[in-house]
Amino acid sequence: MIAIETFSLTKKFGSFTAVRDLSFKVKEGIIFGLLGPNGAGKTTTLRMIYGALKPTSGIAKILGVDVAKEPLKAKKLMGILPEDTGIYPRLTAEENLIYFGKLRGMERSTLEMRIDNLLGILKLEKKRYIIADKLSRGQKQKVAFARAILDEPPILLLDEPTLGVDVMSAREIRRLIKEYASSGKTVMLSTHNMWEVEKLCGRIGIISNGQLRYIGSKDELEKLAGEKEFEDVFIRLVRGETIETV
Ligand SMILES: Nc1ncnc2c1ncn2[C@@H]1O[C@H](COP(=O)(O)OP(=O)(O)OP(=O)(O)O)[C@@H](O)[C@H]1O
Ligand SMILES: [Mg+2]
């Protein structure tokens, strides 16, 4: 089944087109990485897919559900990590998770177990009762990641999930993302970390100036670019140094 699908998704801010005519499909159980330079349109794309931003035109669907037409149904299917983390600064780390879990209708005992488990894995136990405003950038990011996967929705949309996170926790986040996909769930993420893309993503989309230039597996993109190092692949493809598309 197709987990995420967009049809000619376009976003204009005034006369500026941030995302143009984006169409792609992501199958269930895949980790799809969106790569592109600053300002390429990754966050704008993700925000349109998770329903925080209304597209100027085009459609986004999650497991067949049109995000614009059935926003509540679509939202229940997604766990989201926004670019700005979106956690409540005046609630503690734990309260942020409890509040969200209740909102999602999680049963109390499941919620408590899940919170204990995730705070442990992400090395946040000591920050459990600290208000989010007083957490470091990386700690906030980890709370936001925990919130995104809290009730294990079928789709995860993660905007730079390991941004500002230390090596050990980034590894745990990647492990959780991998585990997620191997259980048949679907992850779409944006990142600037080439190594992360190589390690994690079954499919990769390269976006620049609001347009999806290439989409394919790591091997397909390497072949297309004629490069071995993924950083070189990325640079070549962003510059449009090849003419074919996958
Ligand atoms: N609310 C907005 N109003 C006007 N322009 C916007 C708005 N949001 C984004 N843009 C513009 O749209 C373009 C794409 O921005 P976006 O945040 O999607 O990029 P990105 O690929 O996520 O970049 P980064 O890697 O820096 O996170 C940028 O040129 C940005 O300035
Ligand atoms: Mg962004």
Image (cartoon, helix red, strand yellow):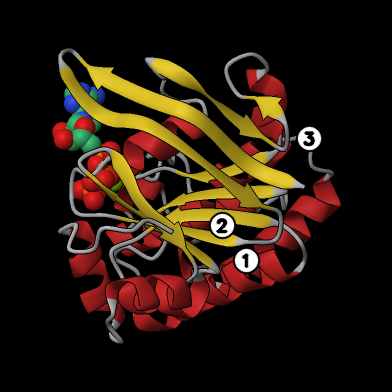
Q: From this view, report whether residue 107 is shown above or below residue 140.
A: above
Q: What's the residue type where badge 2 is placed?
A: Ala
Q: Residue at x 19, y 68 (%)?
A: 236
Mark 1 lies on a secondary structure that is helix
The reply to whether dot 2 and dot 1 touch (C-beta < 8 Å) is yes
User: Pointer 1: what residue?
Assistant: 118
Q: Is residue 59 visible?
A: yes
Q: Is residue 208 left or right of residue 59?
A: left
Mark 3 lies on a secondary structure that is loop
Q: Residue at x 35, y 69 (%)?
A: 165
User: Pointer 2: what residue?
Assistant: 146
Quick one: label 2 or label 1, which is nearer the N terminus? 1
Q: Which disc, if any, is residue 105?
A: 3
Q: Nearer the viewer, residue 139 or 94?
A: 139
Callout 1 crowding tier (Cα within 10 Å): few <14, some 14–19, many ≥20: many
Residue 193 location, quadrant: bottom left
Please provide percent x and percent y for residue 132.
39, 48
